[in-house]
Image: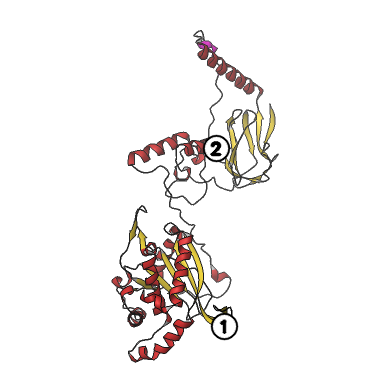
Amino acid sequence: MSNEIIKVPDIGDVGAVEIIEVLVAVGDTIAKDDLIVTLESDKATMEVPSETAGVVTKVMVSVGDEVSEGTDLIEIEVDSSFLRRQESQQASDDSKKNAADSGDSRLRENDAVIAPKKVVEKPMPKQVKKAAPPVVDAKTLSGKKAHASPAIRKYARELGADINVISGTGRKGRITKADVTAFIKQAMQSGGTVNSTPTFEVLPPPNEDFSKYGEIETIALSRIQKISGKYLHRNWVRIPHVTQFDESDITDMEAFRQANKADAKAQGFSLSPLAFIIKAVAVALKKFPRFNSSLDAGGENLVMKKYYHIGIAVDTPNGLVVPVLRDVLSKTVMDIAKEMGEISLKAREGKLTPADMKGGCFSVSSLGGIGGTAFTPIINAPEVAILGVSRSKIKPEYNKKGEVEPRLMLPLSLSYDHRVIDGADAARFIVYLSAVLSDLKKMLL
């Protein structure tokens, strides 16, 4: 008997690769070409077979280790008599295959040889600190690649199955050909699609003891923060957000607002820039109806809305709420300003009803009263877009005569659902919205 070290073979110009599976344990009896580890690079996975047969006496790597060509993997005790039996078995198998191919029926029963000892799976040795990767299925998928050989991955691709949502029943949770076949049969019987999109779950937050670093104070989140936090997280994860930025010249709009501010105050409400912005949004929604739509629950159809209800983000002592102003397109700027003041007061007093916050087509989040130059607002599903407004600022701009003059510029941030709206339409929408804000006459069209 003699011992032999199995090393990482030539893996090309890859460098260090990670071990994602160790398929043998000390005491296992393996045959030549039995798989011992699986390597994974950024582009592919590769299974390393044993170059010889024998009994595993030492495992020199663990899951998660990085290795390169020539790295020691396992040590095998090679038994010469076992090798002879392996060779005899291979010769017998070849002989049987040739006899079957040629129709030779003279193969006798006593031609059979002793089969090698059956491989018995044993627990991983104690020195392996990292556990083997868990079985990946559609319910617990976390974004990590499924554990399957390149051949099985190719087989799944050819049949249109997503390998990442198939449960593995093989050794250490590996996905087998039978698993792929069973998955496809089940999908066909249930009337579902084979290449379904999994629901990815994010990792849980770290459970850190901050008190060991210094003095702390724990404050409970408000009920509104707890509820809105879940919805915001869902919307951010499930909607492909893209944000388009622009500026609008609101010099003339501001002059008109200042001229009518006293009249509004005499009627008991404030004429804020947000009232003009909401009216302008409604006008833009009419011209670009795709922004005034929602995807249905199945994601197969687009529901086009014929009404114009705009939600406004209101900062309250208990957290952010989004009450909805209804039928904005048919109202004047003064009507909108008055209603906005009433519903904002209702929100800050905690008197909003669920009906006050439902039915919105589009939302506006204004931080102009606080500051900032731009931000990425999160879409309020099932809406497909939201407008963020930052603080306006006097900037030098060229007029039509080519002269530089001070103009009041309003930063706009339009976040949109890329499943429904493409970049070109988003750019057209925000350019048109800017034009409406710059020219009050457009609000009447």
Type of amino acid under label 2 = Pro
Q: For residue 7, which quarter of the picture?
A: top right
For the C terminus, the quadrant is: bottom left
Q: Give x and y (percent) for residue 201.
A: 46, 55
Query: Dot 2 corresponds to which residue?
Result: 150
Residue that extends furthest to the top in the rendered view of this protein: 106
Q: Give x and y (percent) for residue 110.
A: 53, 11
Type of amino acid under label 1 = Glu
Q: Is residue 102 magenta?
A: no
Q: Nearer the viewer, residue 139 or 158?
A: 158
Badge 1 crowding class, 10 Å Cα cut-off, few under 14, some 14 to 19, many 20 or more, is few
Q: Nearer the viewer, residue 359 or 352?
A: 359
Q: Secondary structure at mark 2?
A: helix
Q: Closer to the camera: disc 1 or disc 2?
A: 1
Q: Is residue 246 left or right of residue 306?
A: right
Q: Give x and y (percent) for residue 236.
A: 45, 62
**Residue 39 appears anywhere in the view:** yes
**Residue 377 appears anywhere in the view:** no
Asked if 388 appears above or below 100 in the picture, the reply is below
Residue 78: mark in rendering: none
Q: Secondary structure at mark 1?
A: strand
Q: Is residue 116 magenta?
A: yes
Q: How is the image coloured?
A: secondary structure
For the N terminus, the quadrant is: top right
Q: Give x and y (percent) for residue 25.
A: 58, 37
Q: Nearer the viewer, residue 207 or 296?
A: 296
Q: Which residues are magenta?
A: 109-118
Residue shown at 37% from the left, 54% from the top: 299
Asked if 319 appears above or below 172 in the picture, the reply is below
Residue 405: mark in rendering: 1
